[in-house]
Amino acid sequence: MTCREGLEDTTMPLANGKIIAKIEGANAPLVNKTVITLINEERKIAAGEMVRPQAEADNIVTLQPFRDKCEPVFLFSLNGKIIAKIEGANAPLVNKTVITLINEERKIAAGEMVRPQYHEIALVDSEIEDIGEAPYESVHEPCGIAVIKPNAVINRKVLDIKEKITRAGFVIEAEDKRILTEDQVIDFYSSMADQPDFEEFISFMTTGLSCVLVIYQGSEQMPVLEETEAEPETELKEPTEDQPDVKAEVTPVVTMKQDRTLQEYLERQHISQFCDLEEDVIRVTKFIDIFFPDFKKMKDMKLQKTLALLRPDLFHERKEEVLHFIEDEGFKILDQRQIILSEQEAHTLCKEYENENYFEKLIEYMTSLCAQFAMGSLPVNQLYGSDSLETAEREIEHFFPLQSTLALIKPHATREQREDILRIIKEAGFDLTQAKEMLLTQERANKIYSKISGKPFYKDVLEMLSEGPSLVLVLTKWNAIAEWRHLMGPVDPEEARLLSPDSIRARFGISILKNIVHGSSNAYEATDSIGKIFEEFVSENPEEN
């Protein structure tokens, strides 16, 4: 366990929750020697070649969760906060972590870097916390945090990059599309801070949508086929007068190449210019906490989506009771709608009953709207649920088809208000499909406000938009256009504060002109605006971006 108070490092290895050694100062050789000695001792103890030495530290309350555990645990502490944890005798990982911390301290002491801000890792007994599942700080460490840059997102290369990563045997455990803040860019790209164009790079990274991935090494890393040219078997000779110049035939040879790191693979796949990777174990843990604060919980819960359907009798008589019961059981209702099934949809959902003599009555029952048409005597379960993940995905797509709308955060929104609005958008279940900060010239504004471009007040709109860059978004979910307009609230912020006090315009709007946000009115307008605005940012040759 390494404790760092100010600039002084103190390393304290643990055994069974007891401190058994203490090294003060950044003495890398001594730390390495101590770690190797302890690991060799563990192996001898496991083989029955020696008895575990005894050391007393029973009065250290903080270490109680680790008492009576045979597996060594290495904790790395900064100013009294645990910032990294390694379980098991993983010598290379411990060695790499110690060296990284020592080098970091030297840079901080020399004024070459600012001390990073770490999030504390709680001391929780992994056997109690997660029986049968290894915690993510354990042996199964994430091998990297990847940031797919805005030029790749806007050129629709995200899916291709993700497919190449998974095809090589890596696992994407979490992903999130987000607009990085200036602090996040400075922190993630701290190694580039001394480059002359770093300020320009920060602007590039904070004005568009990035995709952040948490990547794990899969159980098997797949070797990748690589075509190379074999050397010609015959030695080239100078041509003679009676013998023409004959070129040696070179035959392509397919070889199997195993990349040692994810970075090597990204470079060889020619996608490293679109995707930046952090592989340092301490920084990976830190950025997981920043970008995915609920990552551990999400990973353990293994969330799934399914479709549920209340058949007519149950819907009319006990709808609210059933919905409350579903939520009380720990389910979250993402979307709901009242529908009249077509005959084809009813046939699909009732396929399991198609050989029963009441099947036709069941179809009539399922396609009815009013209670008087319901066949209460039918021996059919009043609740329906998807029977597999594949079926759920197909049925959700059918009954809740995704829709995209164009959204605009106007130039008078502050950075803090932008971040608040983006958070509200995510909490409402929207996916950020595209995002770009841009100055809306009259030409660009016409593509968004074509409906009012001929109105007398349009010049006031253009003047307001010219005050600074706006953030243009593509939001995606079921019924996105109506949902976004509801979330925005009435056009007049004063009216919004009366009729819809929780809406975005009620909270952040100033006036009808400066009402903070805008959205498409209908599907045609949304499709037309999205196509015109974002197509101009997709070059004919994306590789050049």
Image (cartoon, rainbow, N blue to C red):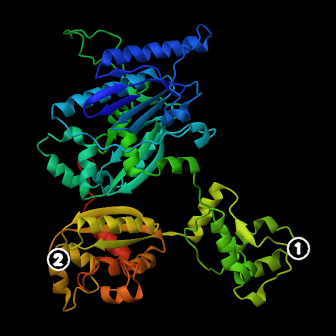
Say which amino acid is labelled 1. Asn
Direction from residue 54 to residue 285 in the image, left or right: left
- The outermost residue toward the front is 59
Residue at 81 percent of width and 68 percent of height = 354
Task: Give the x, y percent position of residue 318.
Answer: 72, 80
Question: Where does label 2 land, which residue?
Answer: 442
Direction from residue 500 to residue 414 in the image, left or right: left
- The outermost residue toward the bottom is 456
- How many numbered markers are drawn? 2
Query: Could you tell me which secondary element the residue under label 2 belongs to?
Result: helix
Task: Give the x, y percent position of residue 392.
Answer: 63, 60
Say which amino acid is labelled 2. Gln
| Gap in angstroms between the C-alphas marked 1 and 2 | 66 Å
Query: Could you tell me which secondary element the residue under label 1 belongs to?
Result: loop
Which disc, if any, is residue 357?
Answer: 1
Q: Is residue 190 visible?
A: yes
Direction from residue 366 to residue 255 in the image, left or right: left
Direction from residue 399 to residue 290 in the image, left or right: left
The mark that comes first in sequence, 1 or 2, is 1
Res. 484 image quadrant: bottom left
Q: Nearer the viewer, residue 4 or 462?
A: 4
Label 2 environment density (alpha carbons within 10 Å; few <14, some 14–19, many ≥20): some
Q: Nearer the viewer, residue 424 or 278?
A: 424
- The outermost residue toward the right is 357
Q: Nearer the viewer, residue 417 or 163?
A: 417
Res. 351 image quadrant: bottom right
Q: Is residue 519 visible?
A: no
Residue at 30 percent of width and 50 percent of height = 149
Label 1 environment density (alpha carbons within 10 Å; few <14, some 14–19, many ≥20): few
Residue at 37 percent of width and 34 percent of height = 77
